[in-house]
């Protein structure tokens, strides 16, 4: 009746240009859709702000009957939005609309075409959304299982791992996805991602499909184990070590090992696991010869320092440029707890640097060109090279005890 009285069949709203047909599809009003199309409604015209068509909506809403009607009236099956180039198929996958996906593919939708800004395909989305049924449908219609995004070369498998989509990972691997191919910018593989995210179940699947357990990134040679340690992913570390990961191999640019990283991050549990798997407790970096103990001190990682010392770390090993020892570093960082631990393990309180002969207690007070840190909880009164080792040691002990008592009192 409205149309008999000259209503505009393709009139649009002023906010985003929606047509009556678009609204009918949005509300799954099948009879309205049919009559509007039969009376000449434009099947392609919808939300004009981003060219989101009635077909996009029907795909999203999982309405195969409406999809078929729109296509019978010349809707473009591979039409794209103006914002980032999404197709109706892409939207169907994004909303896990399995019936829409099936009918669109059967009627000729391009299985490879999706978000055109970065070539993020329907298969990437299905992998991310953990939709194995949709993955199978797409692959049956010639989607490329190892297709990559244009920004950093991510594959569908990489996305499945990134979003912990275990079912997607399994079906992709079973259907031939490359277990080694991931982020192509710097060869960050699915195994690196699974290790980082602490997904042991997923990297077991990857290793069963020939992923390289000791693969390295192209930027600085990080291994999956190194990444697991860096993100404190204890479960990942345990499984990787049990499955044969090299406990010594980490950042190859400077030989910064998983043990250095665990020490830095204050992870005693991981330190113990690495040492049980033959990591070298006194290994040194190639840039300036830092040991895991030195790194633990640098980052004030008290628990790391304690476990490393208890398990045999050499307390005197210094960085090689100026023979700056862990004790020098602990003094500089103003860490009385660590100073006491080092001294309890026979650190030489009178050791000197090779450049200008600085002792730890001189460094602790920043002698010479550096101002005295009079607020230090370790120091009181005179600091610098003239202060005796005995005074320094006893002061450390007293301040450590006071700190312990304060902590106990606060706890009460």
Image: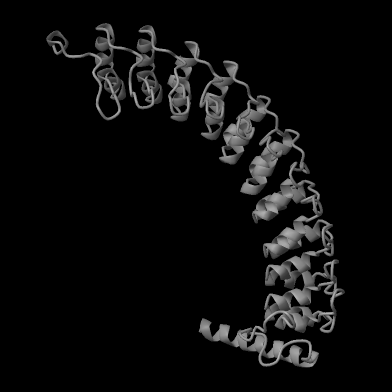
- 412 on left or right of 365: left
Identity of the residue drawn at 78% across and 91% down: 386
Residue 272: x and y in percent read 75, 62
Residue that protrudes farthest toward the front in the picture: 369
Name the quadrant containing residue 363. bottom right
Q: In the displayed structure, would residue 412 be above or below residue 147? A: below
Number of numbered callouts drawn = 0
Q: In the displayed structure, would residue 54 be above or below residue 380? A: above
- 268 on left or right of 281: left
Residue 183: x and y in percent read 66, 36
Identity of the residue drawn at 66% across and 30% down: 173
Coloring basis for residues: one colour
Name the quadrant containing residue 37. top left
Residue 111: x and y in percent read 54, 18
Residue 317: x and y in percent read 85, 70
Question: Where's the N terminus, which quadrant?
Answer: top left
- 409 on left or right of 14: right
């Amino acid at each position: 009746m409205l149309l008999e009285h000259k209503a505009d069949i393709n009139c649009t709203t002023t906010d985003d240009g929606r047509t009556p047909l678009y609204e009918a599809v949005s509300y799954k009003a099948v009879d309205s859709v049919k009559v509007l199309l039969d009376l000449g409604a434009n099947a392609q015209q919808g939300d004009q702000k981003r060219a989101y068509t009635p077909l996009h909506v029907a795909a999203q809403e999982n309405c195969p009957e409406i999809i078929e009607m729109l296509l019978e009236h010349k809707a473009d099956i591979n039409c794209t939005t103006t914002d980032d180039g999404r197709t109706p198929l892409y939207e169907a996958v994004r909303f896990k609309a399995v019936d829409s996906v099936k009918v669109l593919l059967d009627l000729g939708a391009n299985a490879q075409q999706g978000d055109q800004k970065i070539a993020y395909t329907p298969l990437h989305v299905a992998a991310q959304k953990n939709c194995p049924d949709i993955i199978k449908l797409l692959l049956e219609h010639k989607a490329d299982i190892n297709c990559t995004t244009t920004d950093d070369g991510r594959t569908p498998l990489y996305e499945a791992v990134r979003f912990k989509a275990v079912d997607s990972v399994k079906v992709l691997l079973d259907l031939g996805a490359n277990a080694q191919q991931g982020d192509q910018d710097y060869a960050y593989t699915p195994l690196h991602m699974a290790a980082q995210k602490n997904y042991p179940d997923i990297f077991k699947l990857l290793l069963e499909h020939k992923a390289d357990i000791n693969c390295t990134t192209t930027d600085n040679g990080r291994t999956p184990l190194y990444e697991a340690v860096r993100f404190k992913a204890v479960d990942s570390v345990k499984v990787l070590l049990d499955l044969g990961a090299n406990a010594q191999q980490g950042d190859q640019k400077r030989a910064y090992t998983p043990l250095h990283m665990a020490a830095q991050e204050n992870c005693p549990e991981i330190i113990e696991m690495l040492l049980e798997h033959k990591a070298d407790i006194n290994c040194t970096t190639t840039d300036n010869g830092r040991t895991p103990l030195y790194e633990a001190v640098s980052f004030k990682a008290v628990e790391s320092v304690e476990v490393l010392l208890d398990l045999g770390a050499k307390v005197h090993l210094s960085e090689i440029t100026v023979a700056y020892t862990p004790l020098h570093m602990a003094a500089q960082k103003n860490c009385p707890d660590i100073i006491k631990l080092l001294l309890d393990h026979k650190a030489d309180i009178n050791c000197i640097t090779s450049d200008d002969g600085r002792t730890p207690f001189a460094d602790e007070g920043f002698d010479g060109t550096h101002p005295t840190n009079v607020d230090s909880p370790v120091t009181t009164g005179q600091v610098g090279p003239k202060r005796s080792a005995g005074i320094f040691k006893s002061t450390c002990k007293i301040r450590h005890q006071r700190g312990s008592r304060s902590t106990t009192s606060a706890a009460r």
